[in-house]
Amino acid sequence: MLAIMDVCSHVKVVVRVRPTNDNEKCENFRNVVQVVDNHMLIFDPKEQQMTSFGGPRVRNRDVNKRANKDLKFVFDNVFGEDSSQVDIFENTTKRILDGVLNGFNCTVFAYGATGAGKTHTMLGSSNDPGVMYRTMTELFSRMDQVKEEKIFDVAFSYLEVYNEQIRDLLANVGPLAVREDPSKGVVIQGLTLHQPKSAEHILEALDYGNRNRTQHPTDMNATSSRSHAVFQIYLKQQDRTASLNPNVRVAKMSLIDLAGSERASATNAKGARQREGANINRSLLALGNVINALADPKSKKAHIPYRDSKLTRLLKDSLGGNCRTVMIANISPSSKSYDDTHNTLKYANRAKEIKSSLKRNVVSLDSHIGQYAVICERQREEIVQLKKKLKEYEERKMDPLVPGGSNTINTISSQNQTEIHKVSESLQSIFSSRTQIRREHLVLERQLKENELRQRHSEECNQQAQLFSHERKLASLFTQQQHIRKRLEEAELRFLENNGWLHRVENDMKLLGQDSQPPVVLQKDLRCHRLQLQVEDLKQHIEQMTHLIGIQDQENKQTKKMVDMLLPAYSRQYWTLRGSGLVTAADEAENQDLEHLVLRERGVVWADQEKAGEQKDEETQAEGSRLRPELVPILSFSHLICPHQNSPCSSKS
Amino acid sequence: MDTTLSIPTTGPRLSHTEITNMASTYSHEWRAVCDKFNNAQDLSEVESRKDPENDPFRSKYKARELLREIYCSLKNFDVGENESVNDEADQRPTEQPVDGGMEEGFGRGHCGDSPAGSRAAKLGAVEYYLGVNHVETEELSAGEEHLMNCMTLLEKCSISPENVSLFIQVRNQLGILWAGRDEIEKAQGFLETAEAMYIRYMKEDGQPPMDLTEFFVAEEEALPQQERTKRFEMAYTHTLYYLAQVYKNLEQYEKAGGYCHSTLQRQLEFNQFIPLEWAINAATLSQYYITKTLYMEGRHCLSAASVIAGLAGEVPSEAAAQESEAEAEKRDQLRQKRAEIARCWIKYCLNLLQDAKKLLEDNIGELDMDRQAELRATRLKEEEEKERGRKSAVLFGSSDTFDSICGLEEKVSCVFPVDFEEARAIFLVGQTYVNQAKEYFEMDGHVTDHIEILQDHSALFKALAFFEEDLERRCKMHKRRVDMMEPICKDLNSQYYLLVCRQLQFELAETYYEMMDLKLAVANKQDDLDAHTVKKFNHLCSSSTKFYQMFLDSVRSPEGKWPEKLEDEVLRPALVAKFRVARLHSRLISSSKTVQLENLNRALECYNFVVQYCKDNPEAKSAIETELELSEEMVSLLPLKINRIQANLASSN
């Protein structure tokens, strides 16, 4: 049955919680559904207060034994215990009627366990009629409103799907066959159609049909309800104004009472197997359910042979495309039907999610991705060409506007223009590759620095640990370094090559202008390119420095952690040694040094010690720099030499 | 912990004798117990099926009473002799054993075949049956309690041939019980232990163990070895099957798939399956493998499915079906299931071709020679590995089916095709299955299924066309696609099959587009664009436009109005269609400036539509980023082109 939902497009899901009945109140069952607002409810909420002195709670013991699930569910609408039939109708089928009158096939599902209030919601009682009756009355009144303009043709049918067999509930005939007709849609052969005289007439027919059902919906003793009841109304409308092209609209509304959710619903067990309903997951017969769940049913890649085909087939034309679908899930709030309620909510929640996953179903654009890329690519080419043409066109348009320009000059300058254009284009390409090279160069540099930094960290680590050999890591870092160096050299070579190219173009530029000065346009162009490159460069510098600092920061953190651990440990050791009189002079001196080191930071506080502190500070710094070079060179990157005049000829360098 | 196994090598015979010996003192009472047990079994397994709907568990309750009596008698039997055992059991009834390591049960407490061990096992068996009885009557907590009692009793025994089955089955029951309560990890613990116990037992002992029912039968009624094996293996099959469910629920689909596979394999091996059902399961499992690009496994499943479906018998003739309803049903079932399997085969061939295409295509969707060579090379390497992998894979088939399964496998490759010849071989197999599937899923009666098959057929052609180097022939393949879809698209009533109609329209539009591109490429190669080619080209162009337009019209309201806001699932397709229509208009070839102007204006209109729509509905932007960007550029460029042509036209007049 889940398969039905997979073909469905827009599902609006509402949940109705029925009031607790006397029976449940008497037996002291817990309330397991808490309606939060119009859209949310909590299933099995955490209990706020302790329960009163132990009542007879033996029967739902297994519920209490487990921790509360406290699951939140959000739906299009949640109707609490005090909601009226009118509320449900207004928010579900009333809106759907607009669709029907507009010529869309619409479907309403009622779902829920036996005793969860499904029948009350759909049929209701004579003084408080349910959704079906109200829908019919509304339909008839709507038709009445426009009867001057339109001719209506209404017919209805009522059938049942039970054990994969379709039976007409309004006529006593054998099982019916369902088939899809290319022009008429889903056709149930031999199904009787009836013309209603009024809304009441339809209800009478419903009542009659219900008595024919394999299991009467109100039969509370039924252990399992596997019968789906499908009530369909066909509406044909036509403009009264006689015209050559009569506007005929046909729509179908289906109201479906889905089989109970209290039994594993995806099976179509027969006879003896039926007994296994509740324990279906134990039986190997349900292996198919597990396998079905493995392949994604929504992906068009795979074909999943669904087993419950009749109802799905029956509703195929009502669920795809421009249909409107509402699902009304009915639940009981009592812990007596804990599992049923949980199952219903899970199912309803699944139905809701289908909405978002439908896109893939409609028109699969993704299968044409390859070809699609080509289309876009060609279009891009076209645009580039158009732009080029446009540029030429505009340039030509501009030229005559140049004051005092004679014809000859014009032609020359136009020639010149194309030349300039060409140069400008080559500048463009030089700089785009230049940017590329620089980017690579800087990335490599970063890798190199990162490598250096890590090497240093590793070395330090080695010194500190001494006991452990980190040579392997160092070795791998070293080979990496070699590798990066090599690539860096390559990048530098490419940059030089690019430089040579630029130099040539610059010479070309000079030839174009007067007095060996390149035309202003091109000069600007070049400058612009240079600046852009520089900006890119600096941006990358910043990014990479941040990266390196991040690495150093981690190392610092590590060091800090170590110091934090070492100092207390040291001091403990020291005092223990001292306590037992084992301190040597060397130890004493070491301790003194360390104290100074530590006090350096506090030196600021003690004014009289400041000097000594500073002295120490310098010393330690000097010592530090001896041990390891400054960080600054590592954190900075090579800058681009940016001549504002001419690039050096490649031969020079 | 002592891990040596203490299974007597003399086997169950001996222990059985002991049971009888032990019971001989009470032979009368013992006989009564056995009778009661048989009765209980009969009530639970046979009678319960006849229970009325309104008292579904009548026989189960009766059986429960009998089991309780048996339990009491057993408790009283050996009170004198086994006081200590009794005490021990009573002292810690609340302690619940939880499965931890797999060493459990091997080497602790009583030997499985000691009198004390025997007694514990017998009591455990009764607890087990009581537990199952409660679970089957939906009293889960009570059931759990009994099953845990059984675990406690067994805790003191080491595994032996007479109790190993109980060890495993009680864990099966607890596993599925907790799985039903959504406490998957707990279930997993029990089931994985059961699995480990089976494996270890089979490795270290391996003789057919005693069945649970044999605890309560006279010696002469002991089951033959073969039957014992069958029952024991079945219990283990259930373990695997429950594990499949557990892993599915944990979303470990790979593992779940593996366990489904093993379950199927064991069903076949021990001859416990219904052919059609098994075949459908295997075919569905293949679809899982396909989506994971495991084609060897997928092919194996499909071949087995085809062979096993063949075991379900001959399809009754049409004449026979008309005679009897049973024959008609059988005919329908057989034909349907075989057609379903054929459809799974189609997906296999299609995905294999499409995945190969993805590997081989360059960024504009053409065959990339380098990749082709690369794939050839890696394939050679992989083939050897696969051959090795095959030997370790779980293979289907009993002695009489294995050869036919292998035979079927050999008919189609499971490696990616690299050239046209290989692709064609796969295509042809796919096409055979297309025809087979269409025999049952005829257009008349199975519209949506039939069309889905056609769409797959078309996709097969499309994938094959990718491998075809000759452009003319490639074009002909696309023509085949058009020929199969176009008539159906025209006949189909979009009122009922909107979704399908839209899919067909889109695909037809794209196919024409592809053909147009191919025609142009061919013409370019020959370097002449004669009138005939131009005519052909324009025809393809307008055909493509026509179908995009049909799709766009389907989005309109019944009054023919374009919706102000496109619904989510048609948003991207509709805008893409508009964009393509624009492009198609600008590509039409005409020598007349007026016609050119007209086409360009239409194109501009469509580009404008896309741009304007995204301006009005900014949320649509993300859906068609690339197209929007291109459209915006065209909107700024096209007017200039139009102006130029206009100016040209004006000057020439």
Image (cartoon, rainbow, N blue to C red):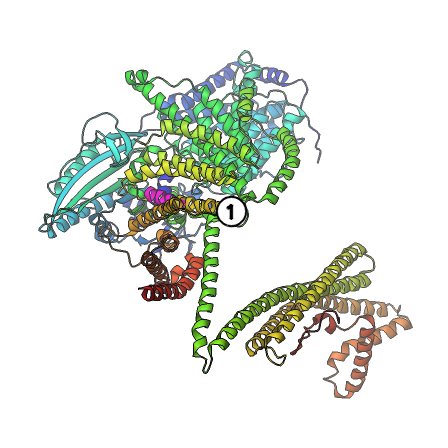
Residue under label 1, please give it: B365
Q: Chain of mark 1?
A: B
The answer to whether residue A114 shows anywhere in this view is no
The answer to whether residue A471 shows anywhere in this view is yes
Near-viewer residue (B51 or B609): B609
In the displayed orientation, state which residue is furthest to the right: A585
Q: Give the quadrant of residue B322.
A: top left
Task: Please give left or right for residue B320 compared with residue A565 in the image.
Answer: left
User: In this rendering, is residue A502 above or below A617?
Assistant: above
Near-viewer residue (B527 or B571): B527
Tell me the element at label 1: loop
Locate residue B51, reporting x and y percent: 34, 24
Locate residue B247, reporting x and y percent: 53, 39
User: In this rendering, is residue A549 above or below A185?
Assistant: below
User: In this rendering, is residue A483 above or below A168?
Assistant: below
Quadrant in which the N terminus of chain A is drawn: top left
Locate residue B131, reporting x and y percent: 47, 31
Quadrant in which the C terminus of chain A is drawn: bottom right
Task: Please give left or right for residue B214 compared with residue B2 in the image.
Answer: left
Residue B508 lies in the magenta stretch: yes
Which residue is painted at 43% across and 79% down in the image?
A: A401
In the displayed orientation, state which residue is furthest to the top: B220
Q: Amino acid at mark 1?
A: Gly
Near-viewer residue (A121 or A451): A451
Span of residues in magenta: B499-510
Prevailing SS of the magenta stretch: helix
The crowding category of the residue bearing disc 1, from other C-alpha atoms within 10 Å (few below 14, some 14 to 19, many at least 20), is some
Q: Give the quadrant of residue A467.
A: bottom right
Residue A63 lies in the magenta stretch: no
